[in-house]
Amino acid sequence: MRSPDWTKNTNARFVALEYRPRSERTETPPTGKRPVLLVIENAPGELEFYIAPDLGNFVDRSDLAYLEDLFADLPARAQEDGENLYEQLRSLSVGLLVVYAEGSCPADAERLKSIYQQVARRHSSQS
């Protein structure tokens, strides 16, 4: 999978979230295992969502349906209020999903590219 060139988008910022199984939900900071969701804000409120395609391989069965429903709902929520949704996601620090990494472009373009390559299915809030 070839990633876009984020060095050209000076307005983009991103946040990646990692999954925490129940046994690790009290740990801080994030464990850094791997991102399950990458959210890119290309312009205020304009969000793209990239979801790890193999969630079922490492997400606890008891959490999988919830995460799939949550991720499926994100584009609709972004259409309603993408700016606030982005801020909510980047503030997650406890629970099932926590911030794995965040940054902006072009400064963090290489880190974004690395995270992007770990997730595959794209869901955009743009019609």
Image: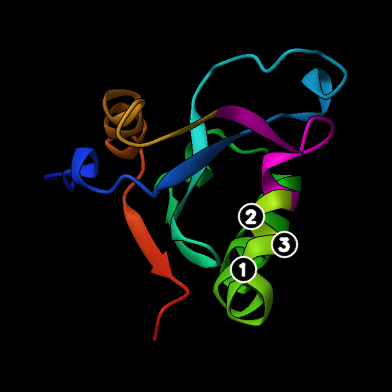
Residue named by callout 2:
86
Whether label 1 touches label 2, CB < 8 Å? yes
Q: How far apart are marks 1 and 2 (CA)?
A: 6 Å
Disc number placed over residue 82 in the picture, else none: 1
Q: In the figure, 50 relative to 127: above or below?
A: above
Residue, far bottom:
127
Whether label 3 touches label 2, CB < 8 Å? yes
Q: How far apart are marks 3 and 2 (CA)?
A: 5 Å
Whether label 1 touches label 3, CB < 8 Å? yes
Which quadrant of the rendered structure holds the C terminus? bottom left
106 vs 65, nearest the viewer:
106
Which quadrant of the rendered structure holds the N terminus? top left
Q: Residue 117 at what x, y percent from top left?
A: 27, 36
Residue named by callout 3:
84
Label 2 SS:
helix
Q: Quadrant of residue 116?
A: top left
Q: What stretch is highlighted in magenta?
A: 88-101
